[in-house]
Image (cartoon, rainbow, N blue to C red):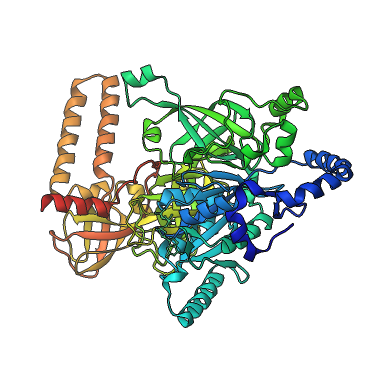
Amino acid sequence: MGIDSSSFSSISNRYEGRFVRHWDYNNSLIIYDKKSDDSRNAQSQAATTDQKEVQLQHDLEEEEPVPYVVLVQGPPKVGKSMLIKSLVKFFTMHHLDNVRGPITVVSGKHRRLQFVECPNDVNGMIDAAKYADLVLFCIDASYGFEMETFEFFNLLQVHGFPNVIGVLSHLDKIKCDGQLKVTKQRLSRQFRNEIYGGAELFYLSRLDNGMYMDDEIHNLAMFISVMKFNPLSWQTAHPYVLVDHFEDVTSPERVQIDNKCDRNIVMYGYLRGSNFKRGTKVHIAGAGDFPVYGITSLADPCSLPIAAKMKGVNDKERLFYAPMSGLWGLLYDKDAEYVDERNDNDEVTRSEIEGFRAGTYLKLEVHDVPFEMTKNIDPNCPILVGGISLEDENVGYMQARLKRHSWHRKLLKTRDPIIVSAGWRRYQTRPIYAQEDGGNRLHRIDSTPEHTDCLAMFWGPLAPLDTGFVAVHNLAGNKAAFRISAMGVILDFTQAAEIVAKILKKCNQVGTPLQTFKKTAPIKDMFTSDLEIDWFKDAAIQTARVRGNVEKVLLPCAKTNFGGLGYSISVKLVSLVYQLCLIGQAAKKKLVSELIRKGDQRREGIASCSFQHKISLCDKVFMRVWKQVSELKDSGDCTGQGMESVGELKDSLNKVIS
Ligand SMILES: Nc1nc2c(ncn2[C@@H]2O[C@H](COP(=O)(O)OP(=O)(O)OP(=O)(O)O)[C@@H](O)[C@H]2O)c(=O)[nH]1
């Protein structure tokens, strides 16, 4: 007996003991009266036994799909936990006291869902955008859209847009009916403009006994239970694990000796994306890259009913699994290895050859992670572990097209640290911003342009071409500012410094006159060699008042007239003649070559320049030149708040001084 949404509320209150639930072949949840169905079941049992066996066999041949991650996102106090509690109650009839970490529930005959509350710190949001299969955007209707929602839109745009559903809560705070209607229309229009025309929006009108209304949750849950999930290209191409349980297994003796020693940890979770081969390294978001010390597949703690039946597990124990919230559903031995009741030898051989399959529940052991990771572990901020290939381990220079987000208040300055999120990684780096001139040259700019994009060159773990990335300025919880600084795409990468060599920066070369004539003057200290003077022949120069041009290298004979320099060379010539008389032939040669070298050093880099008028001896002569920028090997995993920019450092220094 199926039920409609209006009668669900009353039935669900009487559910325990009398009503049972199951999923029909369309994956729809059906709740029916156990008593009235007992007699009908007895009659139909014999007739359906054969059919069930056929169906069971067919279902077993299908792969057991991994639970879909349903991320509940929204600003603080919008009702995220309340929504997860209401949905978990609907699917499992269990009341959750706390929402901590991923919560896996069986939502249908062929479907499991893993509910995760999206953290509001930038790190957590960035990671969540990478693992979400469906995002429920919670919007406080009495307030409207908030910054966190738009920040998350932007993160999704970069990391691949999964399915999204809008959920309007706090509607009961709008007392006037007319205003309620207008608000609903306005918010749904705005939501669909931001996402896409047909984006679904659900309304949660009020709370009932501290929970959302049953019929409204029923509609939302039914929609999620049958909706089609679209795999995202990055996720399907890489193995990854959303950790739902975490343990520090460092020996207590080691910690007693040094409580800041690197830790050994064990992480549990479903393998998603592609197969995980032994020997693959993993990137733990925010902590770095690590080899996997041990990997084991475990019995699925929340199997689909059909698979559990085969494994002989009691149905009632598998409806949910939320270890971080203190609800284990099915207790399992953490050391037990998964054994298939079909052919375990085949299973082991297969995992050796093709790796662990997506959907396997894994135990990953990683050694020597920084102690901060275990110290600062926050169950509300799930850990993302991404498998990395050999190419992903390379570091080098990347050239990217980058655009500052128009809502980010400040321009981004060259060499100021930013946190880049690309692929699984998020790391700090100090980019150089540049713009192309007509030729092959790139001109360094001091800060990002106001309304257009520019190029950014930075050092870091190499990401494939066309990978989108997002940059945040720092991770401090400054809620007043829009935290997404810029977005971009990787255009080029190399391990050599040739990308950086192409960037030129404008700077002033300063020289001083040795002596001044009517319209010419020899200029020293502006060039380092005669060759450089030849390069800059005819280049424009100027003093504070007078313009001029570089003419030519000053010849040695002419130079002897100039004060100290001429005197110094004359003294050296006299000394040469004197010493030549005293020493032998071999020593003579050595001395001559040495003197010539010294004399050359002295002579190099003095240019004869012409001016429009006579300049004075105390004038400084400037020439604007393009110079290559120095190297920018500067990046690292971002574990704390991130480095401070030069401006921020100056600010803090001023504060200390004052
Ligand atoms: N009146 C009313 N109150 C609501 C509604 N939804 C949630 N609340 C209340 O809002 C408060 C915050 O709800 P939570 O579910 O803890 O919100 P949250 O988004 O998880 O909060 P954080 O985890 O702290 O970010 C609770 O006191 C709820 O009772 C609603 O639709 N109407």
Q: How many marks?
A: 0
Instruction: Give me the residue at 51% from left, 79% from top.
Output: 181
In the image, residue 150 sits, relative to residue 129, either above or below, namely below
Q: Quadrant of residue 597?
A: top left
Quick one: 344 or 173, which is closer to the camera? 173
Residue extending farthest bottom: 178
Describe residue 36's horizontal placement relative to residue 440 as left or right. Answer: right
Q: Position of residue 291 (x, y in %)?
A: 53, 28
Residue extending farthest left: 658
Residue 443 in view, yes or no: no
Quick one: 91 or 72, which is closer to the camera? 91
Q: Position of residue 78 (x, y in %)?
A: 43, 61
- Ligand 1 location (quadrant): bottom left
Instruction: Give me the residue at 51% from left, 60% from top.
Output: 212
Quick one: 447 or 248, which is closer to the camera? 248
Q: Quadrant of residue 51?
A: top right
Q: Position of residue 617 (x, y in %)?
A: 13, 59
Quick one: 647 or 375, which is closer to the camera? 375
Instruction: Give me the residue at 36% from left, 56% from top.
Output: 505
In the image, residue 9 sits, relative to residue 422, either above or below, namely below
Describe residue 494's horizontal placement relative to residue 54 as left or right. Answer: left
Location of the N terminus (image quadrant): bottom right
Instruction: Give me the residue at 65% from left, 35% from top.
Output: 360
Residue 248 in view, yes or no: yes
Describe residue 462's horizontal placement relative to residue 306 as left or right. Answer: left
In the image, residue 143 sits, relative to residue 124, either above or below, namely below
